[in-house]
Image: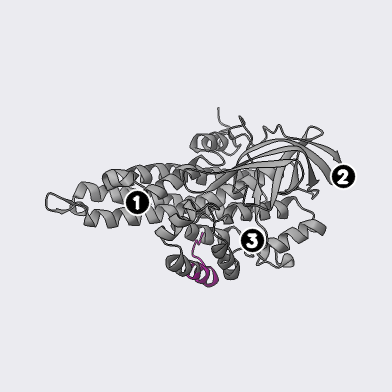
């Protein structure tokens, strides 16, 4: 299978990297993280101008109809620069509207506005005490047709406070359905906070909050899992960029840190460590690229198999590379003054978002293709 990016994808990646190298350096990123908003409207406008917001949106709604591989290209670059803007959350919200929406009316309007960068989206996957179980949904919906009201709580909604609309799973007549809720809807309250990796998250509470049910042909529990797999794929792609940046930062640091009168990069044992770090990153890259190719498979189990395999390998690589980078940086590796510490924090959060290594190992092992039929 050929994993080489085509010319358009490579040019897009190069343009995005040039912008981030020039305008989104480590100090600029830290200033955004420390700001009250935690995100930058100026950078969001630049992403819109570069075409990032339109990339995942279907052509019929003014987008570029970018597929999983196109998004992988983008997320790698964003991960390399530790971008904290709500791009991933919005892209997952766009995928939710694409999968669960009708392709008409308000669904079209939201996609068009998202493509133009006018609105941001977020999917409220998590609930208190549900851990990684997507289907442990206690939030309830009551109503008829498209118009409902929601009651319940969603926790750790990534960039929930920055989103203009939330896609919220809730139980309607005992079945899981997906609903669109406006941030300013009556009865909706949120608590915004910064996570340890510099991102933003929120707790959402609904008390008779008006919501519109997504009524497309694929809008139930299966769609929720599909959307979560898309989010998992984007996280894996982001992790690849962070792994590359952390490996590069570690090599550079070992060339300057002196021990016994010479740079520690000359010590063969440490060279072996850095080679192992590179191998972990490359293995994670291979399985993530494969997951991107198989995400759109009509075979649901094939998609699940590929996504969970990628999340497991990326999670293992994130932990190994992060721990080794801290060891090789010494005490500097856990200080806020160096990018390595922030890269490790981001990788640690990615590993535990939408299912950690153990969760996805269990999911992988439960798939029919993994279970042997031999006695």
Residue that carries the numbered disc 2 in the rendered image = 145
Q: CA distance from mark 1 to mark 2?
A: 54 Å
Where does the magenta region start and end?
1-15
Asked which secondary structure carries label 1, the reply is loop
Numbered circle sitting on residue 265: none
Front residue of 306 and 343:
343
Residue extending farthest to the top is: 375
Q: Name the residue at 73% across, 65% down.
A: 61
Residue 156: in magenta span:
no
Question: Alpha-carbon neighbours of circle 1 within 10 Å: few (<14), some, or many (≥20)?
Answer: few
Q: Quadrant of the C terminus?
A: top right
Give the residue pinned by disc 1.
337
Judge the density around disc 3: few (<14), some (14-19), many (≥20) Cα neighbours within 10 Å: many
How far apart are the alpha carbons under marks 3 and 1?
A: 35 Å
Gap between marks 3 and 2, in whole Å? 28 Å
- Kindly state the secondary structure of the residue where label 3 is placed: loop
Looking at the image, is mark 1 or mark 2 earlier in the sequence? 2
Name the spot of residue 89 as percent of width and height, x first: 60, 52
Number of the front mark, 3 or 2: 2
């Amino acid at each position: 299978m050929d994993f080489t990016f085509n010319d358009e994808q490579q040019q897009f990646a190069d343009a995005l990297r040039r912008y981030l190298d020039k305008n989104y350096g480590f100090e600029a990123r830290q200033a955004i993280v420390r700001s009250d908003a935690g995100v930058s409207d100026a950078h969001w406008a630049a992403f819109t101008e570069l075409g990032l917001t339109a990339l995942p949106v279907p052509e019929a709604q003014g987008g570029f109809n970018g597929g999983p591989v196109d998004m992988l290209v983008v997320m790698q670059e964003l991960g390399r620069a530790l971008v904290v803007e709500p791009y991933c959350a919005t892209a997952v919200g766009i995928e939710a509207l694409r999968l669960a929406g009708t392709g008409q009316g308000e669904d079209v309007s939201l996609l068009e506005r998202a493509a133009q960068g006018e609105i941001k989206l977020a999917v409220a996957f998590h609930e208190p005490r549900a851990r990684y179980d997507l289907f442990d949904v206690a939030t309830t919906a009551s109503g008829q047709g498209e118009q409902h009201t929601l009651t319940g709580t969603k926790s750790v909604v990534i960039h929930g406070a920055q989103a203009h609309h939330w896609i919220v799973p809730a139980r309607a007549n005992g079945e899981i359905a997906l609903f669109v809720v406006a941030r300013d809807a009556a009865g909706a309250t949120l608590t915004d906070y910064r996570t340890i990796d510099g991102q933003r998250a929120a707790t959402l509470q609904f008390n008779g909050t008006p919501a519109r049910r997504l009524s497309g042909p694929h809008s139930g529990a299966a769609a929720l899992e599909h959307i979560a797999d898309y989010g998992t794929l984007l996280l894996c792609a982001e992790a690849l960029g962070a792994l590359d940046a952390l490996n590069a930062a570690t090599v550079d640091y070992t060339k300057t840190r002196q021990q016994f009168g010479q740079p520690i990069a000359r010590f063969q044992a440490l060279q072996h460590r850095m080679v192992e770090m590179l191998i972990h990153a490359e293995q994670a890259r291979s399985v993530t690229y494969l997951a991107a190719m198989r995400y759109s498979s009509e075979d649901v189990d094939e998609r699940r198999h590929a996504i969970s395999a990628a999340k497991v390998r990326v999670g293992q690589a994130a932990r190994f590379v992060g721990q080794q980078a801290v060891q090789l940086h010494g005490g500097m590796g856990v200080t806020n003054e160096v990018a390595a510490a922030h890269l490790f924090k981001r990788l640690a959060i990615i590993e535990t978002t939408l299912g950690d290594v153990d969760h996805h190992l269990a999911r992988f092992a439960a798939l029919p293709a993994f279970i042997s039929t031999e006695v």
